[in-house]
Image: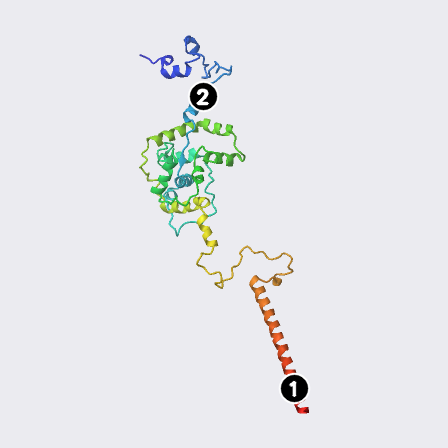
Amino acid sequence: SALVVENSAVYKKIKGGRLGSSNLDELDEFDEDGNFVGDDGDGNGVNFQDRFNRFITTLMGSSDVYCCPLCYIEADRRLGYQDDDEMVEDDESGDEQADDSQVDRFAFVDDPLTILGNLDSEAFEVAATFCFRLLSGLKKHLKVVHGVNLADIEGNDLFKRFQVRAGDGLLQRWLQKNLRRNTVQGDMMRYWNSGENQSFLLLLSQIDRSDPEYSSDFSLSFPNRARKVWNQVSAPYMKHGHDMDDFFADDDESEGSGVVPINPYFTPPSNLKSGSDFKSPEEEMIEKLQKKNRLKAALRGGSERGESSSSSSDDDELEIL
């Protein structure tokens, strides 16, 4: 028999409740364009797309995912070279690496779902192998797949920057860059309602279905560049406490070792007339020692002359006698 839409479970779920309790004629309140001509209880007409977006938003809830920083940056790079197969597959060696130390590793031209979906034509199966619902899954991926040491990372701020929906995460910073202003709630809603909410739900579904022990060929295809990129993205989040050891003398070091410490932040006085008038601390010390030695020499010379004159006068007195 032909399917009667009005009798389907989906139709009754969407149209049930307030409208579908007793009078089934009230269910037929759509116009020819698909707009629901009833109201949402507040007297406001609601079309099907609005109700659908509300339903999708409910499914999304507060779910978020952590993206592997190395895989995400590599996915962004390949999106930029998607028409150049040689550059897509290239994993530059240490000698061939270009100097990109000034590149901002936290700024991206495209939005998160575009970058993640580009790897396999919006199927999100590849992205699901390096995106995780839990932070523990991301850390395990970084250790096992990329072989990085997380012991020197301070806190979890680095990983939060590669969350899709978090404050100061991938989406918010992309919106700020493109809108050139601080984002508001409406900006994110417009992004999600443009169809990206369905892509995000698909990504979540692929993550739940993927094998957490599986590492895709994609994540293993750029080991040389991964090491370089990790050094760049992790640098601002490294622990610096152990570096302070260089600024303190060990207990067994002698303070009188003969090495004069020099303050690297010393600034010469600004009232000097020229650079030649400036003397370093070492030069001033030498000058003071020289003056002191000259003074001692002068004193010794005076005493010697005094002794000489007295002895000559004694000789004269003997001759007179």
The residue shown at (42%, 47%) is 231
Image quadrant occupied by the N terminus = top left
Q: Which residue is mark 1?
A: 314
Instruction: Compute the Cα span from label 1 to label 2.
Output: 127 Å
The residue shown at (37%, 39%) is 139
Q: Are marks 1 and 2 in contact (CB under 8 Å)?
A: no
Label 2, secondary structure: give it.
helix
If you read the primary sequence from the N terminus, does the residue marked by circle 1 or circle 2 appear first?
Answer: 2
| Relative to 240, 127 lies left or right | left
The image shows residue 191 at horizontal and vertical percentages of 47, 29
Image quadrant occupied by the C terminus = bottom right
Q: In the rendered image, which quarter is residue 71 located in?
A: top left
The image shows residue 108 at horizontal and vertical percentages of 46, 39
Q: Which residue is mark 2?
A: 49
The image shows residue 208 at horizontal and vertical percentages of 34, 30
The residue shown at (39%, 16%) is 13
Asked whether the viewer can see residue 307, the reply is yes
Nearer to the camera, 297 or 277: 297
